[in-house]
């Protein structure tokens, strides 16, 4: 009986180590992108992406180029609902052109 109780406690504690809602991703710079700030707000996972050789063709004077981690489907969907258009993918980041309002 003691062996079962110790094993059960170990299993329960092991289950507390990870948060199933946590998604990990690499920063934009790991994919060669330049990030400026979170978008649209300071706690958001998407980033405003700056100009370099990888993004030059995606930039537009009337829109903000935003990158979201490829696994963040909810954030990507939110940017598209705001009028954004997926224009490409660089490494682990989806590039979205969001019109300036």
Image: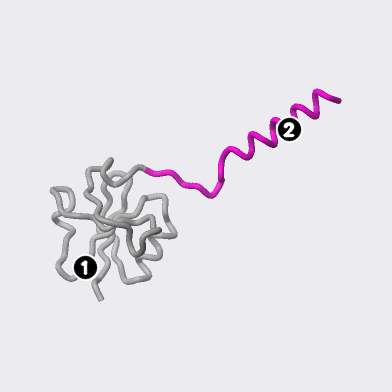
Q: Residues within 10 Å of mark 2 (few under 14, many from 20)?
A: few
Look at 16% across and 65% down and name the residue there: 60
Start and end of the magenta stretch?
Answer: 1-25
Disc 1 crowd rating (10 Å Cα; few below 14, some 14-19, many 20+) is: some
Nearest to the observer: residue 24 or residue 89: 24
The question of residue 21 being in magenta is answered with yes
Quadrant of residue 68 in the image? Answer: bottom left
Look at the image and say whether residue 38 sits in the magenta stretch.
no
Label 2 secondary element: helix
The answer to whether residue 9 is above or below residue 37 is above
**Quarter containing the N terminus:** top right
Q: Which mark is residue 63?
A: 1
19 shown above or below 100: above
Q: Tell me if 87 is positioned left or right of 70 in this view.
A: left
Tell me the residue that label 2 is attached to.
Answer: 9
Outermost residue, front side: 42
8 sits left or right of 17 in the view:
right
Q: Which quadrant would the C terminus be assigned to in this image?
A: bottom left
Q: Residue furthest top?
A: 3
Q: In the displayed image of the protein, which residue is found farthest to the right?
A: 1
Cα–Cα span, label 1 and label 2: 54 Å
Q: Does 8 sit above or below residue 32? A: above
Q: Position of residue 74 (x, y in %)?
A: 44, 59
């Amino acid at each position: 009986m003691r062996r079962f109780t110790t094993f059960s406690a170990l299993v329960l504690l092991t289950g507390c180590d990870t948060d199933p809602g946590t998604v990990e991703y690499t920063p934009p710079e790991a994919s060669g992108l330049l990030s400026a700030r979170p978008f649209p707000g300071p706690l958001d996972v998407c980033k405003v992406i700056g100009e370099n050789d990888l993004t030059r063709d995606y930039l537009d004077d009337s829109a903000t180029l935003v990158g979201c981690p490829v696994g963040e489907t909810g954030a990507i969907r939110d940017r598209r609902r705001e009028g954004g258009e997926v224009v490409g993918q660089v490494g682990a980041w989806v590039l979205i052109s969001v019109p300036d309002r």
